Amino acid sequence: MADWRLAVDIGGTFTDVVLLDAESGRIVVDKTLTTPAAPLDGVRTGLTQLLDRADVKPQDINAPIVHATTLITNALIEGKTGRAALVTTQGFGDTLLIRDEHRYDMYDLQIEFPPPPIPRELTFELNERTIADGSVATEPSTEDLEELTRQLLDAEVESVAVCLLNSYVNATNEQKVAAHLRQALGVPVCISAEISPQIREYPRMTTTACNAATMPVIGPYLDELQKWLSDEGFGGSVLMMLSNGGVVSAGDAARGPIRLVESGPAAGALAGSWFAKRLDIKRLLCFDMGGTTAKACLIEHGEPELTNTFEVARAYRFKKGSGYPVSVPSVDLVEIGAGGGSLARVDQFGLLKVGPESAGADPGPASYAQGGTIPAVTDADVILGLLDPGAFLGGDMPLDASLADTATEAVAEDLSLSMIDTAAGIQDVVNQNMAAAASMHGVEMGMDLRGIPIIAFGGAGPVHACGVAELLESDEVIFPVNASVLSAFGTLVSPVRIDLARSMPRLIKSVDPAERDRLLDELRDEGRRVLNAAGVPDDAIVYRYGVDARYAGQGNEITIWVGEGTSWPVDQAQVVEAFEAEYRRIYGMTIPDVEVEAITWRLSALAPGVAGAAEAGEGSTPGTLSSPGAAGAAEASPVPNRSRPIVFGRGVAAVDTPVYDRSDLAVGTRFNGPAVVEERETTSVIRPGWSVEVAADGSLMATRMQP
């Protein structure tokens, strides 16, 4: 009896869908263009096509449907959010404009920041005050709340963020305001004590504001999606992928959409972790290049690193501090505007630039024949021969090479170069951009990424992976099966998980265990509620504990994780010992005779493997789960089904390159580059100087040959 699991990932250009039989390991995948104006249209198209290909009916799918999306990220970056209001303490209405007074580039006289997620004219001040020790000095009066309601009604807002001073210590005033507004307005209302109950006023406010601004975006979509699924006969509920690599119920996702900002990239990182464990690779760099963006994430010992703060909508992609600081846990990765749809142009200095602007799904690259006139990376790949226009999406979406030529010629004229050299230049620039971003990611993590094996996925990742690997001095690239939809697959190997935090600054030696345990009891109750809503029973929940700590007097903390259980698992001395060990790892030293201070207490509630495919791999070979390779003995010299001329660099003549169909390559097959391996959803390009062996799970293991 088949046990079907379904996953959806809405990207900036394509919507990916994956269907997995957890009993047999059979996988069926499909891609369709994203429909930005009405994302549900693309999802409906993709799911309908997928079920037809698999000969599966909606009624056959009773497990939860797991969903990742870039809707929240794109809404914040593009400013296409709901009409949200912000309510804050009297005298603090300019916080989103003042920010934290940090200039990310002190010498830039034209320094730019993204506009606040909620404008000043929709920011309202309220006469109330909670003191830093948690005592309430002034409660909001009924008269003030009635006046606030009138102002919000006149402003015709679609959602409200409530962020009052010191509410992370005592949320009474926020809860009173929210209860009144929910009843009086009938629109979504969120409070900082639920979204980000942490110290530091500006990050807490901008996190809450971003959450409120995106509630009108995700809420209606999820309502429409669940109604359509129910009408079609799907039996499973919807679980949404979070930035931290976990999934929660659609209801919890709608209340806290800011937790979905890195939803899709996090799913890709989880898929990379799954492969790292099964291939027994201790350190692996995920390289995910789609149609709009490219992402890089380091996997160590089978797990991605998590960060407790990250930035959205940076004004400058490599400048930390130029975006919105968001205080929610996320997989630690770097994301830049470098995808198949990234547009090429010549700047005012006569230099070739690629991205971050993207053609997206509408109009798409010029070769999509949907109205695009500016050359994109995909157009350059067509001109160089890396992509076969007639084989794109298995021939279901043929590309128009003549339109790619016409668009690229305009840029070539500005550069006084040939069209071929211009296309090769576009490829070089985008590869350099991705390698530079990955290197910067390593620097920010204090790691050298040179020589680390790379796993390539996303629709464009396998096309560019070997070129990026050469720039990163990496000698190994893994091309997994179904690489184009690996992020969607990643949602199926994700745990149900929520990460919670609350600030309670105390010197470690002064922590009252009873006070700490009351705080953790509240976090455990919330974690249990979220996981129960996703269908997880109490006895399947694992609780992990951590704390953000620093030496007393410092301005920044480091996070340490101290264990798991049903209660706080360590004593004060063990916390100090764990903090000093981590501090020494990061900074190479400790500071004697200075007390350690705990600032924020953390709890992760998770149920590993509940989402779906994690169990499918247990007790079955990796090949059972994902390999579409041909049966039979491996061929020492596989026979290509055709060849085509490919240009692998500027000033280099085209090389007649063999083209293999991935389904024809049996496990153990070996061949050398240059070569191209095509499957319906993507193309793996093996550059000259690389050799390939097909692994047991169907992955192409490419190794750079020594000269």
Image (cartoon, grey):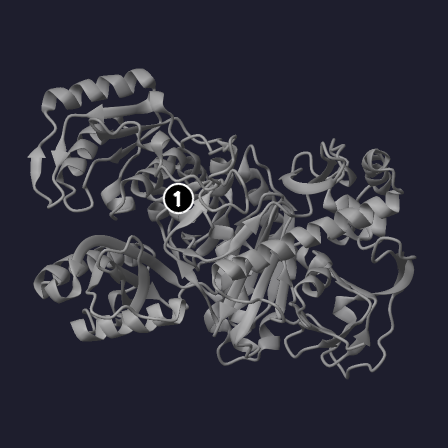
- Dot 1: few (<14), some (14–19), or many (≥20) neighbours within 10 Å? many
| Residue 359 rendering spot, x and y as whole percentages | 67, 37
Horizontal side of residue 264 vs 236, given as left or right: right
Most extreme residue toward the top, as rendered?
154
Quadrant holding the C terminus: bottom right
Location of residue 478 with respect to 437 vertically, above or below: below
Location of residue 647 with respect to 95 vertically, above or below: below
- Is any part of residue 291 visible from this angle? yes
Horizontal side of residue 57 vs 309, given as left or right: right
| Residue assigned mark 1 | 325
Q: Nearer the viewer, residue 666 or 645?
A: 645
Q: Residue at x 68, y 53 (%)?
A: 432
| Residue 585 rendering spot, x and y as whole percentages | 39, 71
Horizontal side of residue 665 vs 115, given as left or right: right
Q: Nearer the viewer, residue 275 or 613?
A: 275
| Residue 27 rendering spot, x and y as whole percentages | 60, 65
Q: Residue at x 25, y 45 (%)?
A: 194
| Residue 597 rendering spot, x and y as whole percentages | 21, 61
Q: Name the image quarter holding residue 173.
A: top left
- Is any part of residue 541 visible from this angle? no
| Secondary structure at numbered mark 1 | strand
Q: Residue at x 78, y 44 (%)?
A: 379
Q: Residue at x 11, y 20 (%)?
A: 143
Instruction: Inspect the image, locate mark 1, and give the three-letter code of the amino acid beneath it.
Output: Pro
